[in-house]
Amino acid sequence: MFGFASAFPLYVASSYFEEAIGHENVSIFYLLIFGGVFGALLLLPRAFRYFSGISLFLVLLFGVGLVHAPLLFFPVSHAGAFFLVWYFLLVTVGWTILDTILENFSEDRFSGRIRSIHLSAMNLGLLIAPFLSTQLLTRYGFSGVFSASLILFSLLFTLFLVFFSRVPLGRKKDISSFSFFGRAFRRPDILRIYAISCAMEFFYAVMIVYMPLRLRELSMDWSDIGIVFTIMLLPFVVIQYPLGLLADRKTGEKELLLGSIFLAAVSTALVGFLESSNVVLWAGVLFSTRLGIAAIEVLRDSYFYKRIGSNDADLIAFFRTASPVGNILAAVILGIALFFVPLSLVFFLPAALLFLSLVPALSLEDNRSDKENANTILRGAV
């Protein structure tokens, strides 16, 4: 439900920003969003000293609901764009809090399966939302999109309050807002998977912000874009659980990550060459990009959460700074690049970064599968 509710404005937001402030200034607002997210994630470990993850998530959901009010009543304007910035800031931090809650119920040997179920559930919501939101945008404008999103968040807040308010999740240890950088930099495995995560988040930033603008530039209407995006997101629902299970039981994450990164890089580079407005062609190419990215997403989560424990809220916060870091880099680099190159060429940048992420992927120390762990225990017993 959180994925479904938060994704409603996701793929139409760049169009809102473009209409409110102009095409050339879209990157500025995404820079504001993820600069704020980065600052919030620095402070988040300290917040866990005073509040449980459940309490923080409830407060955050309430805040998201409040932000919807001006978005419904303001016309498309600078003021509306300001509140949309707050919407994305709160939702992005919400995912990190939800990660911390989930880690309390996770065991390392099942991390691949647990994370893949979590991601598949989230992405099922993301799969449905773009088609519905683009239909609402066509018929009712942005107010229709924000009305649907507000209804969903209100329902989610109510359900979370009823079912989770009594879950006994304690506070975390006292952590300095910046100490987790020191811990993370002493963990090469964490830094390598963080670098891969940054490349993936850079990809997301470019695709979420500029892919709708590119398709509109090619004269594709919103209803066709909704169909393309729905097909594009299918891998997130279909492949993530089998991959998480495979990583747990058989192969570990490293080999699968290398193949996934290569597939995502090659298919993203193809996006830069396309000049057609053919729906089937775009659906096929974008489906291929998400096939690679969906695999990277579940494998990097599986790898990371096997390397930490439930008390490592600081490392989780550090790991999730990959999202604002990737988005800030994208906003700065693309904001400059678009003054000199056409929109179609910017898609070569995430492709190049994905190719570069093969370097840290090759150096990863692979997690052992269930079978290898069982053999180790057996040898120890003998």
Image: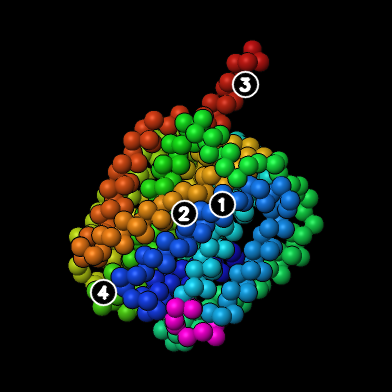
Q: Would you say the residues marked 1 and 4 are in contact, meaning their CB atoms lie under 8 Å apart?
A: no
In the image, what residue type sits under mark 2?
Pro
- Mark 4–mark 2 Cα distance, whole angstroms, equals 27 Å
Upstream in sequence: badge 2 or badge 3: 2
Residue, disc 3: 377
| Element marked by disc 1 | helix
Magenta stretch encompasses residue 58:
no
Camera-side mark, 3 or 1? 1
Q: Are marks 4 and 2 in contact (CB under 8 Å)?
A: no
Q: Looking at the image, is 77 positioned above or below residue 326? A: below
Mark 2 — residue? Answer: 324
Marks 3,4: beta carbons within 8 A: no
- Figure quadrant of the N terminus: bottom right
Q: What residue type is labelled 1?
A: Leu
Q: Which of marks 2 and 3 is in front?
A: 2
Residue 371, compared with residue 41, is above or below; it is: above
Of callouts 1 and 2, the N-terminal one: 1
Q: Give the range drawn in magenta.
A: 72-80
Q: What element carries label 2?
A: helix
Residue linked to disc 4: 217
Q: In which quarter of the image is the C terminus?
A: top right
Amino acid type, label 3: Ile
Label 2 close to label 3 by CB (< 8 Å): no
Badge 3 crowding class, 10 Å Cα cut-off, few under 14, some 14 to 19, many 20 or more, is few
x and y percentages locating residue 369 in the rendered image: 52, 31
The residue carrying mark 1 is 41
Q: Residue 292 appears at what percent x and percent y?
A: 37, 50
Q: Do the residues labelled 1 and 2 touch (CB within 8 Å)?
A: yes
